[in-house]
Image (cartoon, rainbow, N blue to C red):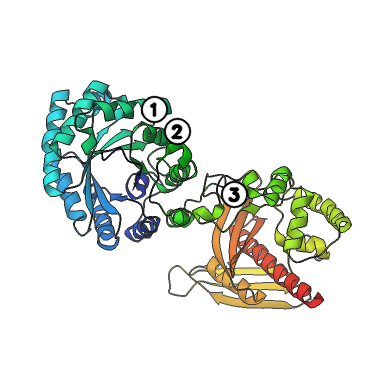
Amino acid sequence: MTNNNNHVKIFDTTLRDGEQAPGFSMAIDAKLTVARALQNLNVDIIEAGFAAASPGDAAAVRAVAEEIEGPIICSLSRLNESDIDASALAIEPAKSRRIHTFIGTSPTHRVAKLKMTEEEILKKISETVAYARSACDNIEFSPEDAIRTERAFLVEAVEAAIEAGATTINIPDTVGYTTPEEITDLFSFLCSTVKDAQKVTFSAHCHDDLGMAVANSLAAVRGGARQIECAINGIGERAGNCSLEEAVMALHTRKDHFGVETQIDTTNIFAASQALARVTHNPIPRNKAIVGRNAFAHEAGIHQHGVLADKRTYEIMDAEAVGMPSNSIVLGKHSGKHALAARITSLGFEVTPERVGEIFIMFKALADTTREVTDADIVRLVTGANDDGRSGPWRVRRVELRAEIEDETPPFARITMEHDGGERRTVTSEGEGPIDAAFAAVCAISDVKGHIVSLDLHHIAAEGVVRAEAIVAVEEKRFTGVSQEVDVADAAVSAFVAAINQAAAMAGAREQIAGAA
């Protein structure tokens, strides 16, 4: 039976339902970036767009179909011939193709939106699904708002679609209304009641309006669904779709409970999440399950002590399993001596337990004034360097930025910085923008080869300041710098310098340890 095995297909709709969400629109090159990430994930189906929606969407679907190999490439269509023709044309270059078509079936959709009777809808399903099947062998049909559709009519609609040639039946919770118990029962009912149910794959498409999209999708699997429709980072209409990374890792981690598996390469999950965040300019919340910065991070002293002894005490999966470098012991005001001592040792310092106790007092005082104590801060506490609170040898003395809008003069920046040794350096650099040029000048002055990974700027109106957080990569290590200034440019540059200072401090510490050895 097609829908009675232990393989759950992953149907990714990041590029269709996900992209429809306000703030997540993607150009063709961005869609291709995400599609490549999905290819690396080894998803079963990529819903690349809604070809009939616009010429641009059709072009994007076709671009994905031309380049991406492995996953089935799918386009959404309303239940009419012109939409189906547009989808068929757009997915034509793909080696494996699917057309996904839908029509509303709930009383609300029938009366308010479609103004059609049940008989008219069933006739439309029979005729148009058959038309789609003549254009493509792989057809998915969705009775939109299925959860609020009367069960008897839902069975009729599904049976009409199967008889007309549908190979996948998707049961969408279009408005995020259902509950886990209810959707398990519905899928069990459909799988046991619908004529020829064994000939098709039943699919779940759940929205997150009540925060249960992942739970409902997993519950649908328990009821017999063997395809989950989801999106990277859970993006999608309104509150979003079922999160791909959460559903996949739940099935992976609790295989003992669900008894099914996917073909996803989980080690590429974090990279896919980052790629989507980058091209849509929507950062991932720190506490986002699986892919957030805090997903494998620990600050509480009790947790840190346990993880240092055996990470299984507080972690149910490995960070490496989703493509993250490792778990993270974050030092802050909740951390204890065990974590501090372990970090001091990992940085190469040998200190006595008595010295750790002395440093711990200073560490706690610092932790009460900052959200996170960095490695460079630890170096400063151990060595006693930079008592003014800086985590490195450089101070910013002057920032000049210029961007000529009306002529072709490249943007440039002139930065002056002072070293603890008294030396002043001034460097002028060009860049794609004045901030980019400023970052290049800072790297030239400090002799630290870093590049910006992310820069978050927040205007705090009540205080009249801009808070900046810059994550900078130096070799294979990342450093975070935070600053607060009145001016946006000053805040951005100061945050970048703070991160570069940490890298410089770490390099200095390594030299000091090597010299002592």
Sequence-wise first label, 3 or 2: 2
Is 273 situated left or right of 353 in this image?
A: left
Could you tell me which residue is drawn at 24 percent across and 48 percent down? Answer: 75
Crowdedness near tag 3: few (<14), some (14–19) or many (≥20) residues, C-alpha within 10 Å: many
Could you tell me which residue is drawn at 79 percent across and 53 percent down? Answer: 363
Could you tell me which residue is drawn at 28 percent across and 30 percent down? Answer: 191
State the residue position of label 2. 212
Is 18 situated left or right of 199 in this image?
A: right
Give the quarter of the image for residue 103. top left
Q: Quadrant of the N terminus?
A: top left
Q: Are marks 2 and 1 in contact (CB under 8 Å)?
A: yes
Sequence-wise first label, 2 or 1: 1
State the residue position of label 3. 296
State the residue position of label 1. 178
Closer to us: mark 1 or mark 3?
A: 3
Crowdedness near tag 1: few (<14), some (14–19) or many (≥20) residues, C-alpha within 10 Å: many
Secondary structure of residue under mark 2 = loop
Q: CA distance from mark 2 to mark 1?
A: 8 Å
Secondary structure of residue under mark 3 = loop
Residue type at mark 2: give it. Answer: Met
Residue type at mark 3: give it. Answer: Phe
Q: Can residue 142 be seen in the rendering of this structure?
A: yes
> Is 369 in front, or is 171?
171
Secondary structure of residue under mark 1 = loop
Q: Can residue 277 be seen in the rendering of this structure?
A: no
